[in-house]
Image: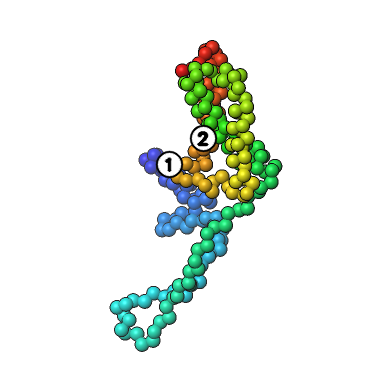
Amino acid sequence: MAASSSAMQMQSLLLASPMTGLASKRQMVQFYNVKPMPRFQRKLNLQVRCLAEEGDQKEPMPTATTPELKPNRPPVSPKVSTKFSDVFAFSGPAPERINGRLAMVGFVAALAMELSNGQDVLTQISNGGIPLFVGTSIVLSLASLIPLFRGETVESRSGQFMSSDAELWNGRFAMLGLVALAFTEYVKGGTLV
């Protein structure tokens, strides 16, 4: 008996709290903090017609007309800056791409020369590799910079398989590979292969 009376007292306290509302035996009135929200309604002149009742009508109902669609214009790409300071900025398009392209060529050339002559990377550089490196750097840098100074973006010639992002990642891996090749050959004291 005491348990049922304490349960009823607890129920009356919970139901009579100001957050949930007031309770009586017949109904419960709830109070909520409701802020009025503006209602956004569309003002369209659309009417729905029933085709089954169309024969019964005497006046034709106006139908909604769809606006004529204009032909889609291709999206205008933002103007690309061709200033020297913008192209060679730290986050600009030139530095990492040129270094990546040079690293890709250098890594493949170093491995090819190592396989054909049996010389490590440092020996290749000391035996006349510097003029070849400088010449290759100039040619690849000019070939990379000419389109950028004309205002072309790097992504404009991107395909699905050979994309600009894939080129960035391949360049990054080639840079790491070239450094790892030179370091491994230095520690080992000879060629890698």
Q: Amino acid at mark 2?
A: Trp
Task: Tell us which disc is closer to us: 2 or 1.
Answer: 2
Give the tally of numbered discs.
2
Report x, y in % for residue 34. Answer: 54, 57
Q: Is residue 111 above or below residue 136?
A: above
Left or right side of 157 for 51? left
Report x, y in % for residue 55. Answer: 30, 84
Tell me if residue 172 can be seen.
Answer: no
Task: Name the residue furthest top.
Answer: 189
Res. 9 image quadrant: top left
Question: Label 1: which residue?
Answer: 6
Rendered residue at 32%/77% (across/down): 51
Per the image, label 1 sits on a secondary structure element best described as: helix
Per the image, label 2 sits on a secondary structure element best described as: helix
Report x, y in % for residue 86. Answer: 67, 43
Q: Is residue 24 above or below residue 91?
A: below
**Local crowd at mark 1 within 10 Å, few (<14), some, or many (≥20)?**
few
Rendered residue at 31%/80% (across/down): 53
